[in-house]
Amino acid sequence: MTMEISSSRKLVNAVMLSLSGLCTVLVIGVLFFILGYLLVHGASSLNWAFFTQLPKPSGETGGGMANAIVGSGKILLLAAAIGVPIGLLAGVFLAEYSSKTYAFIVRYVVDLLNGVPSIVVGIVAYALIVRPMKHFSALAGGIALGIMMIPIAVRTTEEFLRAVPNSLREGAMALGATRAKTIFTVVVPAAISGLASGMMLNLARVAGETAPLLFTALGNTFWSKGYLTPIATLPVMIYNYAIAPQEDLHQQAWAGGFVLLTLVLVINVTARMIIARGPASQRR
Amino acid sequence: MASSTYIADTLHRPANRSFLARLRGGDEVSYLLTLAATVTILLVVGLIVTELWMNSQPTVKAFGWHFLATSDWDPNAGKFGALPFIYGTCVTSFLALLIAVPLGVASAVFLAEMAPPKLSNILTFLIELLAAVPSVIYGLLGIFVLVPLIRAYLVPVLKGAFGYLPLFEGSFYGVSFLSAGLVLSIMVVPFIISVSREVLLAVPVEQREAALALGATKWETTWDIVLPNASNGIFGSVFLALARALGETMAVTMVIGNTPRITASLMSPGYSIAAVIANEFAEASGDLYVSSLIFLGLVLFGLTIVINAVARLFILTTTRRGGG
């Protein structure tokens, strides 16, 4: 017994399916629009001075964001120095040592931390570091971003370590290695490419964070020495220039946006490609 | 560290090694070190909660919970009320979801149900890149690209069609609830798509085959069988997107207009919780002012925590069922 599909049902089918395809095209279109627009506007505003010069005092045109680029680098270094070790070690504990209940609790709290809005992390860094020290500092900004790196660091570490086959652990133990030696000389190295890419993705994610830096690192129009003074960062400078009235500063903001987005996307694409290739090469 | 002689050593007497020996081998050290890392995380989260709570006490003492229902915000006069910000946060997030949910779910359906797997993977990769774009860049594009576009094309259409509604009353200056909602919708769409797609892919393929075998069209299968099966996970993705929209700071700050005002009109400039913290925190003077902003932070924290928890619950139930 065959059932004729009525033409109205066929029509609904065709219309709804094409609509959903259209939505996808629209979303992808937005991505390409963003990339294209930034490419055109940002690249044309970009020049050598952008990378080498300090911002000019207001009223003068020209200048660059050299201090903000270095500042972002310093803050990210600090953030990685805080977020990566804590996240990595905690991830190792969850994957290798933890009891089920404790792992559930930690994972839940980590998810909670992941959901905390970045501006709230900024407030906490302000209350903990800026207020007692009585001045804004790179240290406070780095700690804020470091805290923000922890959740992803934990989850990636746990995930990649769990993907390492148990036979490797058993092999190492059978050879008489201690638990610690097994973990740190066999399991972690086996997952190293995934771990490294995961941490790069994590760093790229916080590299664009602006909100937690507004009242921790604050900003600076000159070079900042050390970690205890206010420091300029790329995202905060883009923000300040974008909302400033001068047309010249808008151009700088576009150039900054272009540099920041290029950095973030290059890291994302590379890291994701390494991760996508990773498990297959491990299985071999 | 431990040498190879040490390994031989442990082979001979593995059971009754003294604590010191195990310490030397690194076992206890690595256990304690990694345990300490997890405890640190628990402490950090505890610290976030207590810092927010302690530092918002001056405001709680001065205004009590009335703070949340007051709409006056005049720091110079010592008047602090959270309502305009809560209102702005809710309106912009709701608007964002109104646009992003249909768009996102439809795209997820396309990616999970129709596109060939290879194409689907490439498109999903591109969409996930959209989620990696920093929010300050969305703000930049919002100010200089989206707002002029809205002014030139969207506002005349809306005014023409629905101008009599209070929603679209008043003149449009560019920065507004509407602009903030639109920017937010673009920002949260990738989350909805990528989570919904996962959930749809988790629906067992037998269910589709059964429906198709009974003569249902592809669309009927999707609408009547696959979507209801995945509904919990899709709700989860929506709540996840909501939590992001509520906490989103920079892009909103740049296009919402930063005016504490409660009005029905989407054309009007407004303010959000995250935006007022971003704008006024660094310059806030006086204990009460700072603590009011921190209290707002606590409110935002509470909101996002609850909504995230709901989202996880929804997603958990679906993936479990799909996997089983």
Image (cartoon, coloured by chain):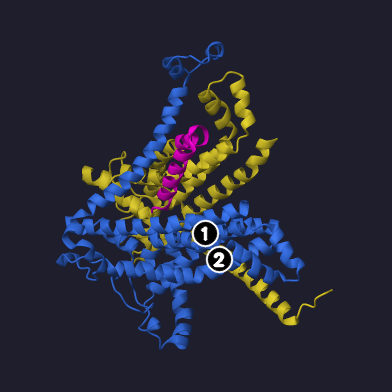
Q: Which chain is blue?
A: B
Residue found at the very far right of the displayed protein: A1
According to the rendering, which colour does chain A have?
A: yellow
The crowding category of the residue bearing disc 1, from other C-alpha atoms within 10 Å (few below 14, some 14 to 19, many at least 20), is many
Q: Secondary structure at mark 2?
A: helix
**Letter of the chain that mark 1 sits on in the rendering:** B
In magenta, the rendered stretch is: A88-116
Q: Quadrant of the C terminus of chain A?
A: top right
Pointer 1 residue: B191
Residue B19 drawn at (x, y percent)? 42, 17
- Chain ID for label 2? B
The percent position of residue A146, horizontal first and vertical second, equals 39, 43
Under mark 2, the amino acid is Gly
Label 1 and label 2: CA atoms lie apart by 8 Å
Sequence-earlier tag: 1 or 2: 2
Residue A11 % position (x, y): 71, 79
Confirm whether residue B6 shows in the render: yes
> Where does residue B195 sit, x and y in percent of width and height?
55, 57
